[in-house]
Structure formats: structure tokens, C-alpha cells
Image (spheres, rainbow, N blue to C red):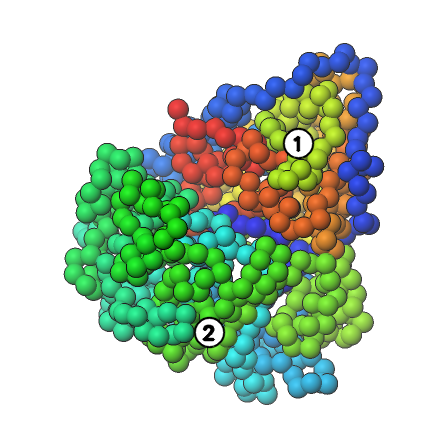
Amino acid sequence: MKALKNKKLLVLAAGAVLSLAACGQPAPSSSSSSASSSSSAPVAEKYVRGDDNAIYKSVLGEFEQLVETAHGIYDDSERYVAYAKAEGDLLAKGLMVPTYTQGGTWAVSRVAPKTISAAVHGLDSDRLQYLVAAKPQAAGQKANFLTKAQRDELKAKWQTAKDAGKSSQYDPKAYLIEKGYEIADEYTVTESAWPQTADLLTTYRAADTEQLVNAIEGLVEYDNVGVLRGAMAVENEDGTPYTVSADGKTYTFKIRPDAKWVDNTGKVMGNVTADDFVAGFQHAFDAKSALSYLASGVIKGVTEYMTGQETDFSQVGYKAVDAQTLQIELVNKESYFPSRLVYSLFMPMNREFFVSKGGVFGITEFQAKKSSADYKYGKTNDVTSILYNSAFYCSKWETTKNSGSMEFTKNPNFYNKDKVNLNKIKFIYDDGSQPMNNYNAAVAGTYAGIGLGKATGLLDKATEDGYFDANAYISDTTATTFFGSLNLNRGAWEGVGGVAKSNQTEHQKVLNNKAFNNQDFRLGFLHGFDRASWRDLSVGQGVGKYSLRNMYTYPDFVKLSKEVTDGNKVFPVNTTYGELVEWYANQKGAKMKAADGQDGWYNLEEAKVKLAAAKAAIPEWGENDRISIDVVYYTGSVSMVAQTNAFKQFIENAIGQYVTINMIGVSTTDDYYNCGYYVETGVDLPQDYFDGSGWGPDYLDPGTYLDTWSVQRDASMLKVCGLDAEAE
């Protein structure tokens, strides 16, 4: 899942409140912070953008081969080792700069911990239907955030339930009532970016799915102790929501008979059937969904349908055997296949309603129809453009790019409505310019909690008000990884509408390209970034390390279930994936530590050695030159201004004799996202270092991360380093 780093300025999910605050003084203008290009080197020739495929092959050719090797291994433990070898190569190339994950910051909250899904992948952690929160205090009374002791008690009770694999053993609602709280029936979250579509089957951006997954439900979902349960699928007597054939390739699901489709008023529009899943699945491929990578080569016939070798969708291994029976046939046995089903590619769509909105089936037919005036399915700001089958329906969608709100109302026809505490969920726009207003709103009860950043002043304010000592806790981290990347093949020096203009000279452009395509430079830059101190200034002294991530995949994502030997190296049972990656990365000369909670890369001595080697290898790099790195930021966000200033400060303090950070401000969130997160091609990325995005896993296998860098697979992350390479 493509995650948006600064999308949620206020994350109020259960036990995972996140502050994206950073520190520093207001940013200078792009002209005042530009690096000098005084140089003793000869004037360079005019910059010419290179060949994407050639650069990709040079930097990631070996990585791609290693990923393909891992994909061909069907023993889980042996495959994990093979993927770790590939990730070790990726990290050792210095192409990406891992920064941090969600959470790991101070927060206060009324939300009971661990009341949303415990899944670290897919979309379930955005589902709020079973969230439990305390109702705010009466007007004029002190804020009733949960105390540290209460949170600790609840987490201990949850751990007991998790160890038993039974969510029913954890009852936070009863606990809060016993402690004198009332249970909240409304929940409000702030957002800084709205969905670009209501058609979840076609998008891989978290910004598009986060709200609407509360109204669309798939076959299965993970509960709050991490057990896969039936959602639209009925559970068998043993608790599993499917049956599997003897060869492990065919999964059969029974759709619950009490599942209903409703419209934007909660009116029943029909039963959910097996054919609704088939209709949704075909539509995704007809629309050339960005999610296609989740099924291509996995489900029988999908690749052939996508490439036009087969035009009859009935030949795809995704069939409605009857009204209540869905059958999925795989190409190869895949132990983790059910974990794929919690992503939006596998959500249902009412066939009749889709057609009523002008929809058609067939790749050629849909591509011809999708831009026509009478195609009205999945439109933004139109709550009538889709149907809903989950705990809520979308009752209000009134948004513009920089304002507005969305509301979701409890669905009275939801099969499990008695366990849904919330009657309404509200998402409201906030650009991050007034963090103290958000704090005051949380104290007053508008929001269920808030992250307490140092740079925003909220940590000091909460301490002054007495909430820090009594109520503050370190929020849980997640499997989502945020990172930065240098632009290896820059093609744009301004954003949409002429914003974020760079003032680099031709010499700087040529020099940057030479440096960014030098592995020693990239590693030197990575080793020279003091991320722990950078985060401390953002979130509070000594706290920054808790959210640090040193690799791309979540290090505890999977572990070996058997001993694996690679050459002379023996990896014992229960070796974590992070331990595997660390070993292979260091074999490649990366000099890093993989575990979360530490700065596993900062090594100033190594940074200077690498940068000196890079400078010596680049004839264009004159004695007085500095590599001038353009970084775009949003001037309206207190957090982002501070965070970007801190980035500049720590990079230049450590390795300023080699590089300088050129901060380029834009005045709207729309301009900021159009300079990074929403850029569709690498050639259009108008900055040298982009760190406004990240990746969260779609299913339970390391391939869900690594495929995003492989042109043979998904390759969705290549654009952040300026590449539009394609499979040859």
C-alpha cells in the first residue's frame, strides 16, 4: 500500500496516535537557501536526462534477479532467506534512505488500545467499526484521557487474549464502563488529503482507501488479536472462513446470507452474492487497476486476461459457483494467499448497480467507456455513486482539494451491527497550520486524542496542563515504512503550474546526476544523516529512536520456521527477517543494523570516507562545489516546516562540506502532493530528494515490499528516484 507520510496530521486510531511534527525555524525562500556553484572545474556540458532502463539495470539489475529467484521458491523459510538477500542488495546500493514508521511518539487518547485490527498488512487497520473509546467529559471538566495505568491494564488484558488467539477474551468496553467512563458513539479524524476516487478496486494509494474501507467489506478480515476471521464469508466449524483443496490451489468461500448492499441512506439495495466478488474482480482488471500486481501470476488466468491473450473472463480462476459460493483457483500453492484478501482488489461490487451507473465489462469496452459522460461509478463527492456493505455507509462527501469533510453513518443493516459502538465517523480537513487548535480540540473532546510533538509545542503544553505525566504514552509502531530517495534521473525543475521552481545551473544538474548515480555518494549521504537526533528535535528528546526504521520491510514481519543454510552461513529457527537482511546487507558492505528503535545507519566517519571517494571519482566535482539537493516542502504546516529545517540542519552539520540542502517551499497541500505523492512518472518528479511517501504491506510475505522496486513486478516506487524503467 502506498502510504502518504503527511496525510494524517492527527491520527486517532486505537492506540496508534501519530504526530508528524518536526522542528526548526521558518524556512528561508528557495533563492536564499540555494547552494553556491562556485567551482574550479570546467563548465559542464548541457544536462541531458539519461536512459531509465540503463540506470535501473546498473543500480538494481542484481536486485531484480534476486527478487525473481525468491519468487520461484515455495518453501516459506527458504524464500524469506532469498528475499533477505535481495533486500540486503537494495540497502547496500544506498538507493533508499529509510527514515521511520508510524507511531513511536508521545500521545494522549480516549481510545482503548488494541480495539482495531492487529493486522500489519492490507487495509484492516483502517477499519473503525469495532473501535472502543471513552466519551468526552462534560463541558468545563478536565479532559478524561485514559491514564497510563489504565492503558497498561488494558494492554495486559489484550496480551492475554492474543496469546490465547481469542479476541472475545478482551473486553475494553466493559473495563471502561467499570472505571466510570461512558462509551463514545462518534469519532472524528483530521485529514490533509482526500480520496481521488471512490472506486477502491482501482487504486493502491492509502489516501484513496482510508475512509471508504469503513463502508466496503471483503471476504475476510483480521481481528484485534491478529486472527483471520470471516467477514462477508461464513466461518466453518473450525473457525476458518474458507476450505482449501488437497493440492492447496483452490479456495472456496461461502458468502453469508445476511450480508446486504445499502445506499447512502442505509436503504437495502440487495443481497451480497458471490457474483459481486467476480464483478469487482473483473472490473479491477478492465480498469487496468494499479492493484493488478496482487493477482497477476497468482490467480489462474489473470495474466492472460490482462495481456489480452484471453478475453473471456469466465476462464479466470475466480468464479461464482452459485449465488453463495465463490471459488478461487491459484497458479501455485501459496501459504500466505488468504492474507492477500484484505486488500481492496478483492472487495465486491454490485454488478447491477455498476451497470446502472454506466459501467461495462471487458477491457476494450471499459477503456472506451470510462471517460464518457454517462459513466458515473465511483465518483468523488458523490455518495450515490457506489453501494456499501459494511458497518457504515458514506452519508456525506463534500470536499475540495484543500477543505471539506466526509461522514460515515452506522449501517442499520450490517450483519454485526450490535458490536459497532460508533454511530458516526467524521473526517475533516486540516492543513497542519494550527497544531495548538487541534490540541485544544482534543482536550475539549472534539478529537479522541492527539500526538504530542516537541516542535509543535504540544509536548510542552501537555506537560504544563498536567496531561503528560498522567496520560501520555508512546504510541504503537506499524509495518509501514517511510523513506527518502535521491533522484537518479531528474527530468523536471518545477511542479504543476510552475510552483517549486529550482534555480540549479546546468553545472549543478550535471554534477547532481553524476553524484546521485554514484553508490559511494548515496551511501555517504545515508551514513551522514543523524536520524535519531533529527527525530528527537521533532518529537522529544530521547523519543525519536522509537519510530526509526533501518530497512524497507518491517524487520519482524516474518521469521524462519526451520533452519536454513546458505553457503557456510546457518540461520536457525525463529531468525527474524530483519536479522537475515542485516547479515546480507553487511556482506555487501552496507555497515548497518536492521532492528527498529535505533539509528542503524549513522556513521559519520564512514560517510566522509564514502563521500570523499565519490568526489574523487567524479571529474566534474570541483574543489568548492557542493551537491545542491532540492527538497520541496509545504510552508503552511508547522510540522513540515520544522521537519524540513531539521533535515537541512543535520545533513549540513554532518556532511556540509559535500552537500547543501536547498529548501523550496510551496503554499498549498495540493502543490506539495503534486510535487511528490501524486506524481505518476519519475520524469515529472520536480525535486532531488523526495521523502513524502512510504509503503505498507499488502500481504504476509516480504515480496509485498520488494516487488515495488522491481520492473518485473510492481515497480511503483521507482518513480520516487526519478525512474520510469520498464521490463525488457
Q: Secondary structure at mark 1?
A: loop
Residue drawn at point x = 66 percent, y = 80 percent: 144
Image quadrant containing the C terminus: top left
**For this view, does 718 lie left or right of residue 573?**
right
- Disc 2 designates what residue? 409
Task: Mark yes or no: residue 290 visible.
Answer: yes
Number of disc labels: 2
Which residue lies under the disc numbered 1? 493
Q: Residue 216 in the image: x percent, y percent?
A: 39, 63
- Structural crowding at the residue carrying mark 2, measured as other residues with C-alpha within 10 Å and reported as few (<14), some (14–19) or many (≥20): many
Please state which of residues 636 and 524 is positioned toward the viewer in this rendering. 636
- Give the side of residue 432 with respect to residue 16, left or right: right
Q: Amino acid at mark 2?
A: Thr
Q: Earlier in the sequence, mark 1 or mark 2?
A: 2
**Disc number at residue 267?**
none
Q: Residue at x 78, y 17 (%)?
A: 622
Q: Front-most of 281 and 514?
A: 281
Q: Could you say where residue 268 lies in the image, as x and y percent from the top left? A: 32, 73
* 329 in relation to 171, above or below: above
Residue displayed at 37% across by 69% down? 263
- The percent coordinates of residue 232 (x first, y second) are 31, 65
- Name above or below for residue 415 compared with residue 431: below
Is 134 in front, or is 429? 429
Above or below, 458 relative to 136 = above
On screen, residue 352 versus residue 19, left or right, reads left
The disc labelled 1 sits on which kind of residue? Trp
